[in-house]
Amino acid sequence: MNLTKTTGWLLVIGIIGSMAFGLSNATASADWSSNAALLTALSTDVDWTKLSFILSAIGQIVIVIGIVGMRDAMSGGVGHKYASMAIWFLAIGATTNLIWSAMMGLTGDQWSTKTTAEAMAVAAAGAGNAEAAQAAAAGAAISAGIAVSALATALAIGAASNLSTFVGVALLGIGLTMQKSLHMILAALITILGIVGIALSIIDSRSTLMFIPWVGTFVILLIIGLGTLGVPVLKKLA
């Protein structure tokens, strides 16, 4: 398999996997501006939530590896140095996204433990076992504290991850535009999505509007990936 085909498969598999797993848990429909709603979503089907976050993050790493192939294909061109810089930011973004995913999983796990412990405390109190109720309540408080701290850490890491990723996306778009190695409309859209992502990451990384640059970037990279595999998705843009 040549470099072009490998790049295409990495982009397609990475994007489909990252989106499919990322949208498969309860947080996909949660209100990310509300800590309470997010904690509830994270603790829903907690085992799958943890796994899906990690698998989605791995998908993003696969995408970055695919973009490395795009950079290599630009070797010697005027846009290569921008693509090379983009890889560094994208790699940092993907790595911190993996850490973010682990922290979100920890948050859901601890909040679920807190909820269970609270139920045990109520049951013990109802049965007249004050000592067991007190122990369960203390355990619930500890788990709640860990969950809240983990969420705060995850949100901070997530903001940094988004910022780094979209700086990389913007640089990649600039490189593709300068080198004219991609249809100008797609290259310009990548640049614009990167800039929008940077702005939203700085202003409010928890905004539902973050969905736009993420999905937009994934869709364009998917088009590129399919195009390199010979799927005629670019014919009308050529």
Image (cartoon, helix red, strand yellow):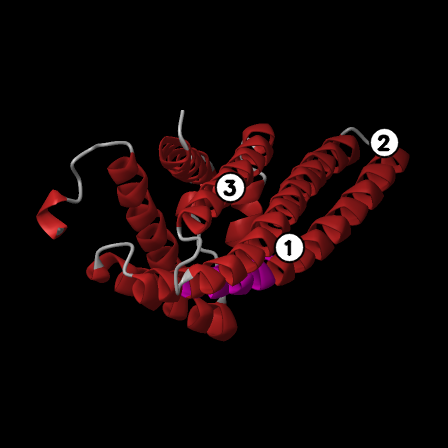
The majority secondary structure of the magenta stretch comes to: helix
162 drawn magenta? yes
Helix, strand or loop at label 2? It is loop
Mark 3 secondary-structure assignment: helix
Which label's residue is closer to the chain start, 1 or 2? 2
Residue that badge 1 annotates: 154
Q: Please state which amino acid type lies under the numbered disc 3.
A: Ile
In the orientation shown, which residue stands out farthest toward the top? 1
Residue with the most extreme left position: 236
Q: Nearer the viewer, residue 89 or 46?
A: 89
Q: Residue at x 35, y 53 (%)?
A: 217
Circle 3 packing at 10 Å, graded few (<14), some (14-19), many (20+), is many
The residue that mark 2 highlights is 129
Q: CA distance from mark 3 to mark 1?
A: 24 Å
Residue 85 vs 58, above or below: the answer is below
Task: List the residue tagged with mark 3.
Answer: 65
Q: CA distance from mark 3 to mark 2?
A: 57 Å
x and y, in percent, of residue 44 in the image: 54, 36
Q: Nearer the viewer, residue 234 or 84?
A: 84
Residue 14 location (% of width, % of height): 44, 36
Q: Residue at x 45, y 38 (%)?
A: 18
Q: Given the image, on which type of amino acid does mark 1 rest?
A: Ala
- Name the residue furthest right: 131
Q: Which residues are magenta?
A: 158-170
The answer to whether any part of residue 33 appears in the image is: no
Does the stretch in magenta take in 132?
no
Q: Is residue 57 left or right of 127 when viewed as pictured?
A: left
Left or right for 103, reference 129: left
Residue at screen point 29% across, 50% down: 220
